[in-house]
Structure formats: structure tokens, C-alpha cells
Image (cartoon, coloured by chain):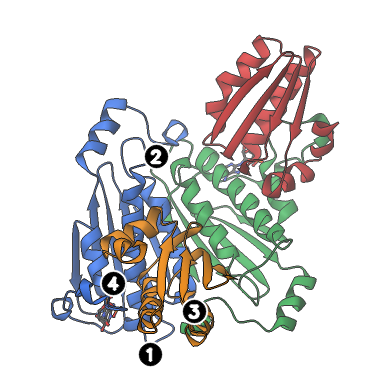
Chain colours: A green, B blue, C red, D orange
Amino acid sequence: MIHLRLPGTLRYRDLAVRVVAAACKLVGKDGDLQKPERAFDDEVVSAFSEAWNNIAIHSYHDQPLGEVQIEIEPDHDQIWIRIQDFGASFEPARVPAPDLEALPESGLGLYIMRSFMDDVTYQPGRPNVLTLTKRLPDRVRSAGRAAGVSRRGDRKK
Amino acid sequence: MIHLRLPGTLRYRDLAVRVVAAACKLVGKDGDLQKPERAFDDEVVSAFSEAWNNIAIHSYHDQPLGEVQIEIEPDHDQIWIRIQDFGASFEPARVPAPDLEALPESGLGLYIMRSFMDDVTYQPGRPNVLTLTKRLPDRVRSAGRAAGVSRRGDRKK
Amino acid sequence: MTFSRKDNGEETVLAIEGALDAVTAPDLRPTLDALVAEKRRKIVVDLSALRLIDSSGVGAIVALFKRIKAQGGLVQVAGLRDQPLAIFRLLRLDRVFTS
Amino acid sequence: MTFSRKDNGEETVLAIEGALDAVTAPDLRPTLDALVAEKRRKIVVDLSALRLIDSSGVGAIVALFKRIKAQGGLVQVAGLRDQPLAIFRLLRLDRVFTS
Ligand SMILES: Nc1ncnc2c1ncn2[C@@H]1O[C@H](COP(=O)(O)OP(=O)(O)O)[C@@H](O)[C@H]1O
Ligand SMILES: Nc1ncnc2c1ncn2[C@@H]1O[C@H](COP(=O)(O)OP(=O)(O)O)[C@@H](O)[C@H]1O
């Protein structure tokens, strides 16, 4: 498990996104997905970016010193991310799905999260708790098993 | 302040190094050092890599599930990193400086840390506490002030 | 994020590199406003060196598209790949911007 | 880390990309052992695409240097830049490997 705690501002966005991108590389049997499995990483990074933006822009809008706590569990067949903030809450069920035909310029964040992750949950409160889960596609899981390669770095663990 | 907690194994080395590299980019007035100030980042990353290796290889040699706690404070004129582990301790004062003329193949880690950082402290115990501090060169500090540019992302903080 | 604008007759190529996101998209705004003010006829947004985009970055490009189109002009996106391609496909923008 | 070996007569070019560190250096070992076993006369280690090296990576290259030299051969390093260059300079290896 990876634990990360840092200020919930846009200034720290790049750092947080890089942690998630590095954690994605630890997912799977071989721990080093090749293209086209890069799509998995791209989709997780996309979803997480939107979650971070929402916290920095909406949740901590008027509380610039708020912290964000992140837990990441990169597993052999999925990644699980929990993001907790202590700012404003909202009701995701009340956010309408975007009308893509109308070429919206905003209101796309939750749609990106829900589309790219297998599971998105949000529990308002103190803290607000958002979880993002994504499983590896079956084809990748079995490829990893068949190759029987070890995780990067396991050797000297 | 950035807080990171994760397993102290070589498997997590890349992730931890990426966090430190991203934190280096937050150091300084403009938060985005240009070359040749990249040298600052390279030296901090080099020192941290050696610290991580030593914990994974020596400190947690026979305790593969040990955790490492890292705090990073990227400041306007320096970076400060504290690394805590719960494994075996050692006495840095007893580690001899390497004889570079003899082209040693190991025993270079502490030398790299001490050479590239302004300050290295180690307190053995439970946990063992290693701190690494590096200040920006004066010339970079004043360049940042003169330009008066804002930190990346401050705008929407 | 860095970007470059190159005009060639009626056409402008706007190349964007790095990450276009909530942090960096505002830096692009003055350039986008200028393109609209100058009523450019055709703009090719070259994203071949773009590493990452988020919904704020997409919003900036969609807004440019709409404003230029309202003036009778055309905005195309070229060079989409990796994470930006995944986002444009999801939002069904890949066809809007490449036809 | 990825690497490639190319032989051209008496000379071998070993190009190493990515990160050469405590995690990846062991993957290079069989190739280094083979170069020694084959008593190669001249080896150029091309590090122009190397992003990161640590003391374990340096150790692997120094060990190769010593073993090849003991057999009367030569190991040179080419393309050093950025973080790897900083490490080689600190350890005063830049001159050992480029002369
Ligand atoms: N973490 C959050 N805290 C408070 N409000 C939020 C949060 N995330 C989303 N919202 C609300 O939900 C709306 C829709 O969010 P989203 O789909 O991400 O699009 P956008 O952020 O572009 O508006 C936001 O405008 C905001 O009102
Ligand atoms: N974190 C640590 N825990 C326990 N022992 C350590 C630690 N770091 C260094 N040492 C001891 O100090 C010695 C010198 O360390 P270093 O200079 O990093 O070179 P190397 O790791 O290549 O031996 C190590 O061989 C080890 O015995």
C-alpha cells in the first residue's frame, strides 16, 4: 500500500499524478505493462487527474491549506485508489451526465472518472471519501500469467 | 509538506524517486528551474536513490515487509527530505570514504549523498532517521527573485 | 506546457507540448483570444507532443473551436496519441476535430 | 532499462537506455559476463539514452572495465549527460572512461 498526504492545490497536481502513474506500472503480474496495455495507465491517470482538479477547485475552493490523503493499492489484477479531503462535499448523483453532442466546455470530470474506471464511489463527510477502482482487462491478466515473469524488483526484495 | 509512506523494497524505488524528482520541481521562486539548474534536481535525485537502496538492501535486508516514511519540504531556497525506516541501524561515521583512485565497485552510496547534499544527518534507532538537505545555489535564488515569476499553479491555488 | 504559433497564409498551426491541464490551460488563453480576434480562417492544433490533457485542456480547445466556427472558420486537431487520444475518443471529439 | 549489443569487428557497442540501478543492473550481468568470456578487445558503452544511474549501475560498468582491462582490452563510455554525467564526474570516472 502506498500512502501519500499533501496539500490539495493545483501546485501539487503534477506530483500526485506522477505517483499514480508510477503505481500503475506496478499493476499486473509482470509489473511492466507494454503497449497497448498503456491504455490502462492512461485511463487511470485521466480519472485521477479529474478527481484532483475537483478537490483543488471545488472542494478546497476557499480553503487553500487543505490536505489530501491518498492510498493506492496496486495489485496483480487491479488498482484501487482512495482519495480523502476535508473540504466542501457534493452529491455526485445530482451531477447530470454531459450532453456530448453539444460540445460542453466543462462538467466532464465525473464523466471521465466513471467512464475510465470500473468503480467510482463517493462518501460525503469529514473527510469526503472518493474511491476509484480499475481492473486489468482479462487478456492482459492471462498474458501476464502465461509469461510467468516476475514483478520488477522482486528479485532483490 | 509532502508525506509518503510505502514498502521499503526495490520494487517501490522508481515511485519514490519520481516523487522526489517532482518535489524538486517545486523548489525555488519560479517553481520551474531551467537548465543548468537541472543539476540541482539531478543531485537530489542521486542522493535520494542511494538512501533508498541502502534501506531496501541493508536496513530491511531480512525484513521484506518494512515500511519507509518520507517527508519532503520543497521550499523557495532549499529542499529538505526526512526518511525513516524501522530496520537495522548502522554507524555512518564508521563507513570509510571510498578511495576513488582504486575504482571501487561498491561503498559509494554515502559518498554520493554527502557530496551532493549540503547536509546529511543520520540518527540510529526505531525508526532510523536520515535527513537530506540541499540549498539552491545563490545565483539561482536571486535569478528567481529578480524575475518575480509566480510558482506554477499558484494562480488557481 | 509550452506552445508555438506559426502562421502560413490563411492557416495557423498551434503546437502544444507537455501537459495541458487546469494548471497550464490559462497560460494559453491570451493566444486563443488573439486567434479569435484576428478571425483566423483555419487553425490546426498540433498535439503530437502533448503528453497529458484533462477536461480543462479539452474545454479550452472546444471553446476555441466554437468561437472560430461561429466566425465561419475551421479548427482541426492533428497528431493525437496516447492519453490525449483516449480522452478525445471518450468525449467523441476525435471525429469533430479531424473532419 | 533496455540495452542492445552490436559487434563490429573487434569493437562492441553496448547501448543502455532508461535507468541502470539496483533494480535493473542484475539484468545486464549475463551480457557483461559474455563480453568478458569472449575477450572483446574494445567496448563502447553508449549512455546517451540513459536517464538515471546509481552506484549499483556504476559498479557494474566499473567491474566490466576492470575485467576487460585485465585481459588487455579497453572499455570506453560515450554519450554521458544529465544525471549520469553528474555521477561520473563526482566519482572522477569521466576521465577514466573517455581516454
Ligand atoms: N470534490 C468536489 N467537491 C465539491 N464539489 C464537486 C466536487 N467534484 C465535483 N463537484 C461539483 O460537481 C460538478 C461537476 O463536476 P465535474 O463533472 O468534475 O465537472 P467540472 O468540474 O468541470 O464542473 C462541479 O461543477 C461541482 O459543482
Ligand atoms: N540504511 C542502512 N542500514 C544499515 N546499514 C547501512 C545502511 N546504509 C549503509 N549501511 C552500511 O554502510 C555501508 C556503506 O554504504 P554505502 O556507502 O551506501 O555503500 P554500499 O551500500 O555500496 O555498501 C554498507 O555496506 C552497509 O554496511
Residue drawn at the location 45% of the way across and 58% of the way down: B18
Residue drawn at the location 69% of the way across and 44% of the way down: C84
Kindly indicate whether the residue at mark 3 contacts the one at mark 4 (C-beta within 8 angstroms): no
Q: Position of residue A107 (x, y in %)?
A: 69, 37
Apparent side of residue A123 relative to residue B75 in the rendered image (left or right): right
Q: How far apart are marks 4 and 2 (CA)?
A: 28 Å
Which circle's residue, 4 or 2, is located before the other in the chain?
Answer: 2
Q: How far apart are marks 4 and 3 (CA)?
A: 30 Å
Residue D15 can be seen, yes or no? yes
Location of mark 1 (residue): B62
Residue A157 can be seen, yes or no? no
- Chain ID for label 4? B
- Chain ID for label 2? B
Q: Return the mark for residue B32.
A: 2
Name the outermost residue toward the left. B93
Location of mark 3 (residue): D40
Q: How crowded is mark 2: few (under 14 residues within 10 Å), some or many (20 or more)?
A: some
Give the label, 2 or 3, closer to the camera: 3
Location of mark 4 (residue): B109
Confirm or reject: label 4 Cβ below 8 Å from ligand 2: yes
Q: How far apart are marks 2 and 1 (CA)?
A: 40 Å
